[in-house]
Amino acid sequence: MSSAVTLLTPRQVAVIGAGAAGLVAAREIRREGHDVVVFEKGEEVGGTWVYTAEVESDPLGLDPKRSVVHSSLYDSLRTNLPRECMGFRDYPFRKREGKERDSRRFPGHREVLMYLQDFSAHFGIGDLVRFQTEVVFAGLGEGGKWKVTSKSPHTDRVDELYDAVIVCNGHYVQPRLPHILGYFLSLSFIYAFRKIKDIVLLLFPGINAWPGKQMHSHNYRTPQPFQDQVVVLIGSSASAVDISRDIAIVAKEVHVAARSVENEKLGKMPGHENMWLHSMIDSVHEDGTVVFQDGNAVRADFIIHCTGYKYDFPFLDTNGEVTVDDNRVGPLYKHVFPPGLAPWLSFVGLPWKVLPFPMLELQSKWIARILSNRIELPLKEDMAEDIEAFYTSLDATGFPKRYTHNMGLLQDCVILQWDYNNWIADQCEFPSVEEWRKQMYMATSKNRVLRPESYRDEWEDDDLVLTAQQDFANYLI
Ligand code: FAD
């Protein structure tokens, strides 16, 4: 364990969530000599990597009163990144010996959970976590401090004051159903007057009379319910790619409806007898038919929406300083600090299409050092100007607002995440992202497109694995 920096004014810091982001944030905050409490509503560390067979009462995730299940993992999930490049920079995701360990390069989800448990134990983070303790309110309190209200099965609501709050609550929890986003009626309003089946009439023309079942991928766990069924999946994300293949093993037919597919790729999918790729759904009908925009039609039993997630901070009250607008959380300086509340409020882990763990580590280092005055943030006005310039550049490229935190975008042929990570690393006087890690990420992305069925077991970057392992020798864990 590394020794903490001695500070003149240690801060009292509340971290919300004990997933990968909260764990590494807690480590960095404590390393800087601050006092930290991690609030975790679940029973263990690991966040999204804590698999559960439990699903929500509303499979589409529209009912605001439903009891929310945090994890979106499915039983068969293996990582879509190789372990060498996925792990934290100074705590490599090495193969571990042991009966329950999964030594594959792209391991199953349980191995990632065990890695995070090892990380937590190694750095003694578990002692900082209050389990089964949900933050129900975080907002400005007396004397410029943050009031954090939490509840647990053992206590009534507890109010406490903190100097700073770091939000690490994850963003793969609340289903995003883009087909209904354009409607101005709030879902809770609709809910007051209609039943779930009626609400989905907003999704596609005809859905009100369509007799099949619908769900969001958040509630997909195993293929068994789809045995001998005809299933339509909407989306082309990593989840859609995995789930379609998982289901195809048992289903009668699987039809994937995706936006922006090249015409030559439409039709039967190579290597599969029962899987087809279509353009987006056009309409659905009373006899069970689903009609695609390319004119094809199938009679289907299920529609699974693999349409992503929306950011949600139900506990956070910032007096309007931070809003979520079409999945843009803002305004945030470098996706972390709202200028009006910096550095006392910060967010870890918002960017997507990234290598998550190394980025969480860098963001956390940056926040920790700012809180101990080792790094200075620009003036509020300068941060606001930087954010405006970023929004303007995003608009100019024609990307929608909801891509604000998408770091897979190319700008002048540069993938944003490396520049972003290196900028933060530079602020923290920490080494830039390793060349092998960048190359491995790119090689895997390419391989995933070329061999969606086998990229986790066949690769051509063994030279990079070797370089990574040599690099890991610098870390004695
Ligand atoms: P989470 O892991 O979601 O943790 C948030 C924590 O906050 C949870 O423990 C939750 O209980 C807690 N919490 C939330 N609200 C409150 C509250 N109000 N009070 C108290 N506690 C609260 N990443 C990879 O690197 N490789 C992969 O292969 C990969 N595959 C993925 C596959 C799927 C299906 C999904 C959904 C994600 C995948 N990811 C992958 C991304 C993954 O989400 C990140 O790697 C990372 O785990 C995110 O960590 P986090 O801490 O930000 O969020």
Image (tube, grey):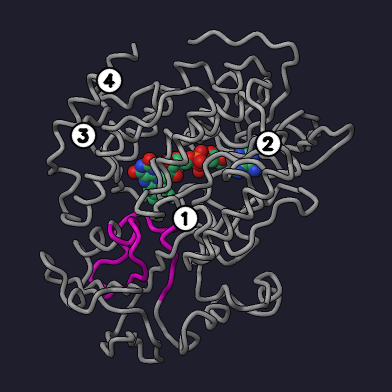
Q: Which amino acid does the dot numbered 2 rest on?
A: Pro
Residue ID for mark 1: 55
Q: Which amino acid does the dot numbered 4 rest on?
A: Asp
Residue 220 visible in the displayed image: yes
Residue ID for mark 4: 471
State the image quarter where residue 378 is shown: top right
3D distance between C-alphas at marks 3 and 4: 19 Å
Residue ID for mark 3: 104
Asked whether, in this view, residue 278 is left or right of residue 419, the answer is left
- Tell me the crowding category of disc 2: few under 14, some 14 to 19, or many 20 or more residues within 10 angstroms, Cα based: few
User: Which is more foreground, mark 3 or mark 1?
Assistant: 3
Disc 2 is placed on an element classified as loop
User: Which is more foreground, mark 3 or mark 4?
Assistant: 4
3D distance between C-alphas at marks 3 and 2: 44 Å
Of the image marks 1 and 2, the number of the one nearer the N terminus: 1
Q: Which amino acid does the dot numbered 3 rest on?
A: Arg
3D distance between C-alphas at marks 3 and 1: 28 Å
3D distance between C-alphas at marks 2 and 4: 34 Å
Range drawn in magenta = 213-241
